[in-house]
Image: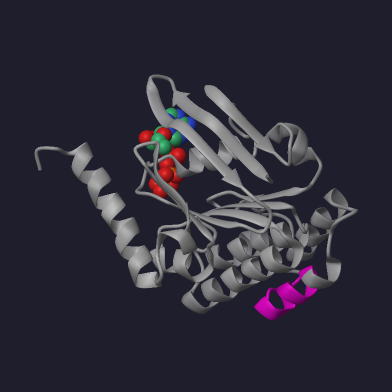
Amino acid sequence: MILETEALAKRYRRRWALHDCTLAVPEGAIVGLVGPNGAGKSTLLQLIVGLLPPTSGAVRVLGGPPATVMRSGRVGFVAQDAPTYAGLTVADHLNLGAGLNPHRWDAVAAASRIDRLGLPLRQRAGGLSGGQRAQLALTIALSKRPDLLILDEPVAALDPLARRAFLDETAAAATAAGTAVVLSTHLVADLAHVCTQVVVLAGGRVRLASAIAELCGSPAELERIVLDQLTQAAAERTPNS
Ligand SMILES: Nc1ncnc2c1ncn2[C@@H]1O[C@H](COP(=O)(O)OP(=O)(O)OP(=O)(O)O)[C@@H](O)[C@H]1O
């Protein structure tokens, strides 16, 4: 397995954000993580990349603890706000990506993606739009050619065509290189388009974790199942409404 979590849980002070989360993600899988605001999606993704320590339970990434594996450059992570360095140019970001990942960096793919997106190499990231900054961060994550790609709402800032194109590129990386991907999204249509597995999280609990092919036969059916889960979770949270 590329990624395994076992009874993973996280508490912030007195509030539990994630309970008893056990998942297994094999090579080449694309896992779509869906859930309402505050469900624990970002918390789970940050535990996976070692940015947060678990309160209990365990995470193994590529067979080891997240913090160690992150240093190896084999994991790509784009956080929800697609962090870039405002004062650095697009070219500086690519050079930084290359410098930090000397053995894996795909300079040709990075340059051609930036060119295709029409991002000026000499433009400082602070002067890019939100969607362009997200594209820059995603380009760096993809060009590292990671074994595991963790993306927190990667397409939220992208326009519809850019969103579809990025998801297709991600699927191509999973097929060609066996990259495993975990991405959170609020768009159920994106799940159906690109994901091989779905995880529904609500109130910090995994309500559903399944291969999509085993769960349903059509995007419409997947959407109905996911929305049913989310509706049930909301009803359980507000039993008197
Ligand atoms: N640093 C923190 N300190 C305290 N509580 C936090 C912290 N980060 C998240 N939480 C709480 O943990 C819960 C889960 O938050 P999380 O950000 O993981 O949800 P999410 O599913 O990613 O939400 P969204 O879809 O809105 O991004 C929420 O109740 C949130 O208020």
* Residue at image coords 71%, 31%: 65
Residue 80 point in image, percent of width and height = 53, 50
Please determine whether, in this image, residue 49 is positioned above or below residue 175.
above
Please determine whether, in this image, residue 40 is positioned above or below residue 197.
above
* Residue at image coords 73%, 64%: 90
- Classify residue 23 as left or right of residue 107: left
Quadrant (top left, top right, bottom left, bottom right) of the C terminus: top left
* Residue at image coords 34%, 37%: 203
Residue located farthest toward the front when viewing the structure as drawn: 214
Magenta residue span: 110-121
Residue 110 point in image, percent of width and height = 78, 68
Residue 162 point in image, percent of width and height = 55, 75
- Classify residue 223 as left or right of residue 55: left
Q: How is the image coloured?
A: one colour
- Image quadrant of residue 27? bottom right
- Image quadrant of residue 131? bottom right
* Residue at image coords 74%, 68%: 176
Residue located farthest toward the right when viewing the structure as drawn: 103
* Camera sees residue 85: no
Decide which of 167, 198 is in the foreground and name it: 198
State yes or no: residue 58 in magenta. Answer: no
Quadrant (top left, top right, bottom left, bottom right) of the N terminus: top right
Residue 2 point in image, percent of width and height = 69, 46
State yes or no: residue 120 in magenta. Answer: yes
- Classify residue 175 as left or right of residue 145: left
* Camera sees residue 121: yes
Which quarter holds ligand 1?
top left
